[in-house]
Amino acid sequence: MSDFQYDVIYIGSGHAAWHGALLLNKFKKKVAIIEKDRISGTCTNYGCNPKILLEGPFEAIESMQHYGDIFSNFPEVSWPKLIEYKQKTINPLHEDLESIFKEQGIDIIKGAGQLVDENTVLVDGKEYTSKYIVLATGQRSNELDIEGNQLIHYSADFLDLKDMPKRITFIGGGFISIEFASIAIKTGSEVSVIVHSDKVLKQYHQPYVNKLIEKLKNEGVSFYFEKDIKSVEKVDTGLKISDDNDFMLETDYVVNATGRIPNVENIGLENVGIDYDKDGIKVNKFMQTNFPNIYASGDVVSKKTPKLTPTATFESNYIGVNILGSDADKLKFPLKALKLLPIKYPAIPNVVYSLPKIAQVGMTVENAEKKSGYKVKTIKFGEQLEFQYKHETDAEMKIVLDRANKLKGAVIYGSAADDLVNILTFIIEKKMSGRELNKMIFAFPSASSGIIQLLGIHMMGVEINL
């Protein structure tokens, strides 16, 4: 390990860090993780995990509602008890993971890490040296520069609300606003969404987005488009939100969901001379910064690849393998012949965890319609598999096929879109043909087996509507 205290130091402890840390530790590398907050990062503590937990009961109720009058009554969700369950389940996770990391021999250093030079990190006045450094500091919520900003809350606050406000407003047109609005409206609250532009979820298939928005409107969510909020003011009856024109809305609780920005400040990038821009830290095709021994991983990276937990995990593992490969001549294990290859992302699915969900993967419908050699097919599996898909009759998907009828992309609207898109991702990534797909046997009469059968028919080039 030469004269350094560590082989690898990670600044940040989320999925962009700890997967690679465990891999390196397995192969006897001396690893440290520096974290100023809870171990395991935003997704585990303040994002994906608590969000999906809170959504569960409401998803169950929505599934019951698809059956019409078969049920004589519907259960009500106790929000305080749900939050109590969330805290009991989610809050210990960071301690559990910290214990696992320590048991594996990874050092946990608590505090804010700051680069001193290309091999040194300062934490609370103490310096730590390492041959390699991985920057995995993630993102944080964007703050609105408006009057009354101190009255605004953020996604982590919503996920820890003890009681649901009578009136709640979300500012922003991204997935956080739409996902949270889907939950809040089912608690009986008066829910509003204020959007700067004329659209929400811009990166997703707009016909399905519009379908979702109409559903939320029918449930009672109010949408206000093309509003540029300038102030939030405390009044006798609650909070007043205003723009520069005549728009005014009263509410009890405001959530800023206008996006997230990379944590590039106060980590010493300027001390070393590491390149970055407004989107994050710049890296090359090997995830290295302009200093070859300093890598960046996850949401803090400036990239076109979607900033998702799975991509952060993929990058973390990739960096771990590359570091092992760089030192392969000193190691006696099968990776010693490893060649350093540029990072190549597989097909990446992404999901809006609304009620219902929207998921997409691969080539978009919009791009396929602009290019020759591709065709778009609509599969209305909710209608065609009514009882198998539990009477969610408006569920459907659009698939993109190339000239050889191989699947190149898909977008799905439905409650099980997140699981279905994983199956389609596998088919895309493995470049499966319709013939290969139809040679496989799936459990029947599951909903997914019927959907795969419908997909396989289209991939065989058969024009049929079952």
Image (cartoon, helix red, strand yellow):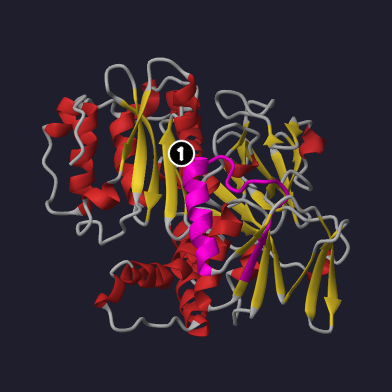
Neighbor class of circle 1 (other Cα within 10 Å; few <14, some 14-19, many 20+) is many
Quarter of the image for residue 192 reads bottom right
User: Which residue sits at x=27%, y=22%?
Assistant: 405
Examine the structure image and report whether residue 211 is included in the region drawn in magenta. Answer: yes
Examine the structure image and report whether residue 320 is included in the region drawn in magenta. Answer: no
User: Visible in this render: residue 181?
Assistant: yes
Amino acid type assigned to the residue bearing label 1 in the image: Phe
- Residue 68 versus residue 376 in the image, above or below: below
Whether residue 212 sits left or right of residue 392 in the image: it is right
Residue 274: x and y in percent read: 74, 31
User: Visible in this render: residue 364?
Assistant: no
User: Which residue sits at x=55%, y=71%?
Assistant: 184
Residue 186: x and y in percent read: 49, 73
User: Which residue sits at x=46%, y=18%?
Assistant: 371
- Residue 23 versus residue 49 in the image, above or below: above
Count of numbered labels shown in the rendering: 1
Quarter of the image for residue 7 reads top right
- Residue 173 versus residue 323 in the image, above or below: below
* Magenta region, residue range: 191-219
Residue 23: x and y in percent read: 43, 43
Residue 425: x and y in percent read: 34, 37
Q: Check the picture and name the quadrant holding the N terminus.
A: top right
Whether residue 400 sits left or right of residue 263 in the image: it is left
Q: Check the picture and name the quadrant holding the C terminus.
A: top left
Q: Which of 395 and 447 is in front in this view?
A: 395
According to the picture, the residue beneath numbered tag 1 turns out to be: 314
